Image (cartoon, helix red, strand yellow):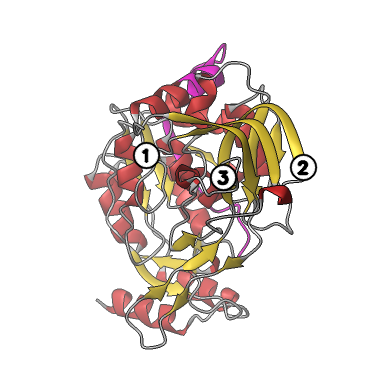
Amino acid sequence: MSLTSIEILLDGIVTPSTFHEAPRAKPEGGGVIPGRFGGGAYWANGALFGRGESVFNSHKNDPAKQIDPVSAQDHLKGRYLYLGLLQNAHFGHFISENIARLWAADLLSGLDGVVFYALHPDQPVQNSVLNVLRFLIPDLPLIRIDRPTRVERLFVPAAFRFPAGFVAGHPLMRDFMAAGVARARKDRPQGPEKVFVSRAGLAREGARFVLEAEIDRNMRAQGYTVIHPEMLGAAEQLRHYADAHQLVFSEGSALHLYALAARPDQQVFIIWRRKTVFPVFERQITSFAGPVPKGDNHVLEMLFHRRFPGANARAQSLLNFAALGSDLAACGFIQPSGWQAPTPEALHQELENLSDAFDVGPAHQALSVVSEG
């Protein structure tokens, strides 16, 4: 069985996940106990089919090795592509981890649909997730598996992904995405050359930057078209990402979608929002033949939400705006004379405005140290 194979399970069985355990810190410290979830693909006799495994960062797919085949009371007649786990409540994990088998949709004829199971069985699939799937596989019905289901012909493609689960740019995956980008650009005018992808439109607890509107203002003054990806559909986002020559991203899920449309002749800069720089973005972008992203980390301090202590996904980030502007200029993304950093007074005031919900003490201190230096 090759790494690019598509296995066909005759009367195969797909089961949903009936549990989800989040990762947790080891009691003795020094690491994390991986989370767990179930669900998977099975042979007709109820034996687990290993190639149907799903991968979710810091989790283990831990389904039963054998099920009673009689438990599959629901039946699907026809030919179905197996997607596996779907992150139905988190767009970033979905776009970065759950599309690694979609490449086969363009190579299989006569499919009747795509089957998947949800990480969170008690929640619907987010519209943003459905929007991407309906764009990438517009002619295939999406079938959510909530009970063990027997499928007449279940096609299980190899999943092109890195060991941690993030989708990788295998040539077949790149071909699949190139066809999607071509559909998005067909009969459309050329988009802007310079695009800034902002998080300023998200909620306060939506992993933003302190005074991010000032970044938007600066980038517009430098000739960038500012977009807020949560307001755009998949096709429109892909058009922007494919057409632009220079792209600046506030670190976030949009980078995972951009990677799928990346070109080697583009220039990309990332404004990091966490104190740790995660290599997954560079690995994904370059695996799809995109450029090595530029941008140092300019986070002075994280402001954690009091209801979500330690949660980066709910925090705001305080930037060294002056250092960010210098970095953008040094990398050729802006003119150095046009960047205007907010004053320390304005930043301190914004920290006070956020103090009703966020722990701002460390940020005040970090800002004072930089201002005095």
Name the kind of residue labelled 1 in the image: Ala
Within 10 Å of the Cα at label 2, are there few (<14), some (14-19), or many (20+) other Cα atoms?
few
Name the kind of residue labelled 3 in the image: Ala
Q: Which residue is mark 2?
A: 74
Q: Position of residue 104 (x, y in %)?
A: 49, 26
Label pair 2/1, CB-CB below 8 angstroms: no
Q: Residue furthest bottom?
A: 28
Q: Residue furthest left?
A: 330
Vertical placement of residue 105 versus 150, above or below = above
Vertical placement of residue 132 versus 110, above or below = below
Label pair 3/1, CB-CB below 8 angstroms: no
Vertical placement of residue 92 versus 183, above or below = below
- How far apart are the alpha carbons under marks 3 and 1? 22 Å
Residue at screen point 55% across, 21% down: 184
Res 168 label: 1
Residue at screen point 44% across, 44% down: 255
Say left or right for 307 vs 282: right
Residue in front for this viewpoint, 356 or 311: 311
Residue 193 seen anywhere in this rendered image of the structure? no
Secondary structure at badge 2 equals strand
Label pair 3/2, CB-CB below 8 angstroms: no
Q: Position of residue 181 (x, y in %)?
A: 49, 23
**In magenta segment, residue 188:** yes
Query: Which image quarter holds the N terminus?
Result: top left
Q: Which residue is mark 3?
A: 41
Residue 302 seen anywhere in this rendered image of the structure? yes
The magenta region covers 179-204
Query: Which image quarter holds the C terminus?
Result: bottom left
For marks 2 and 1 on the same chain, the one whose residue lies earlier in the sequence: 2
Q: Nearer the viewer, mark 2 or mark 1?
A: 2
For marks 3 and 1 on the same chain, the one whose residue lies earlier in the sequence: 3
Say left or right for 312 vs 205: left
